[in-house]
């Protein structure tokens, strides 16, 4: 177990190193000069050159990356050029929106996908199966941002049940905050729910054909017990794998949905930073999201031993 955790931790570090290096290089080859963005169109070339020198932008990329990585390992992600505050503080200030949004979308995904996938497998090649697959296909075909616009048009413009965007804030109470995130959470989790439905159906169908399931039914075990104890539990490893990947995708997908619903989360923060060429902020947010995704996958790997005690990490 210790050797396995050590190997996964090494893979975790290597992945973050690769992602950070890739992001650092890509951000710096994008068109636009951060120095010119900061001083504005009326700034002189001499002032831009002095600012570029002060920011270290005229040094080799390898040197810039080494210095940034050394600071990042100490927890210092730099100072935002746009807001003139530490990047870490900006990220923490936006998490109360992005994290609940992601968790709500994940909750909607699992509570809808698992029963629907199990029902489709139980009704294999019957009307219920075909209907579930049709619904999941529609969910896969509709992009998240388009689903968000349709939800705004229906529930905000026509029905007037919720606001079309914005965030009420947790200081105004739990329900107003949750109410502000309901539509974006549904739009964010729609595609992932459709994918998880298909994964659940496929995994459950594989298990339903096993001998121990037929034996349980032959012994007179109730169908509910067969589906819950004997089938779903043994089908959970591939389902957990897909769900873990999707949870990371939900975090990344929130970037676009937060802009559609005008939510003050990490998504709007990084999009504004890209527009303003705020390099430290872009790097910090992407590094945080990448770290979260890798950590989720690491936790899913450890859950395999809980779901199936036969798995060993030697």
Image (spheres, grey):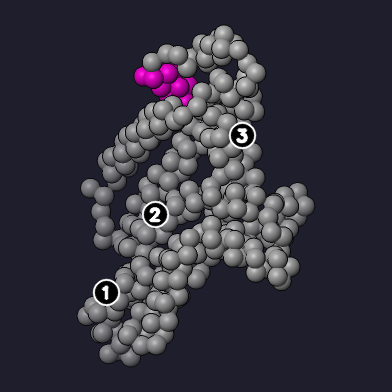
Marks 1 and 2, how far apart at CA: 21 Å
Q: Residue at x 48, y 32 (%)?
A: 283
Query: Label for residue 90?
Result: 3
The numbered mark, 2 or 3, whose residue comes first in the sequence reads 3
Q: Secondary structure at mark 1?
A: helix
Q: Secondary structure at mark 2?
A: helix
The quadrant where residue 192 appears: bottom left
Q: Residue at x 25, y 79 (%)?
A: 209
Q: Main secondary structure of the magenta part?
A: helix
Give the vertical position of 85 relative to 93 (above or below): above
Mark 3 nearby-residue class (10 Å; few <14, some 14–19, many ≥20): some
Q: Is residue 31 left or right of residue 173?
A: left
Q: Which residue is mark 1?
A: 206
Q: Is residue 262 left or right of residue 10?
A: right
Q: Position of residue 44 (x, y in %)?
A: 60, 12
Give the vertical position of 273 relative to 121 (above or below): above
């Amino acid at each position: 177990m210790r050797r396995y955790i050590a190997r996964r931790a090494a893979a975790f570090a290597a992945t973050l190193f690769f992602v950070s290096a890739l992001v650092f290089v890509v951000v710096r080859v994008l068109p636009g000069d951060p120095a010119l963005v900061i001083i504005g169109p009326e700034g002189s070339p001499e002032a831009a050159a002095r600012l570029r020198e002060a920011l270290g932008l005229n040094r080799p990329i390898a040197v810039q990356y080494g210095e940034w990585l050394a600071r990042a390992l100490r927890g210092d992600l730099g100072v935002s050029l746009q807001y003139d505050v530490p990047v870490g503080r900006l990220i923490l200030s936006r998490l109360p929106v992005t994290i609940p949004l992601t968790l709500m979308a994940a909750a909607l995904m699992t509570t809808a996908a698992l029963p629907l996938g199990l029902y489709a497998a139980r009704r294999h090649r019957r009307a219920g199966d075909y209907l579930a697959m049709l619904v999941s296909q529609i969910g896969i075909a509709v992009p998240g941002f388009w689903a968000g616009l349709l939800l705004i048009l229906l529930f905000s413009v026509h029905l007037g049940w919720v606001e079309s965007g914005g965030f009420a804030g947790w200081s105004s109470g739990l329900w107003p905050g949750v109410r502000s995130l309901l539509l974006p959470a549904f739009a964010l989790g729609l595609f992932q729910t459709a994918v998880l439905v298909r994964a659940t159906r496929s995994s459950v169908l594989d298990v339903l054909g096993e001998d121990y399931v037929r034996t349980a039914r032959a012994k007179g075990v109730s169908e509910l017990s067969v589906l819950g104890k004997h089938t779903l539990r043994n089908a959970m490893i591939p389902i957990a794998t897909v769900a873990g990947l999707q949870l990371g995708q939900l975090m990344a997908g929130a970037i676009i949905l937060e802009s559609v619903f005008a939510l003050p989360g990490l998504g709007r923060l990084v999009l504004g930073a890209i527009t303003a060429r705020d390099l430290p902020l872009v790097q910090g947010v992407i590094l945080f999201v990448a770290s979260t995704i890798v950590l989720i996958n690491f936790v899913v790997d450890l859950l395999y031993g809980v779901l199936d005690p036969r798995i060993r990490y030697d």
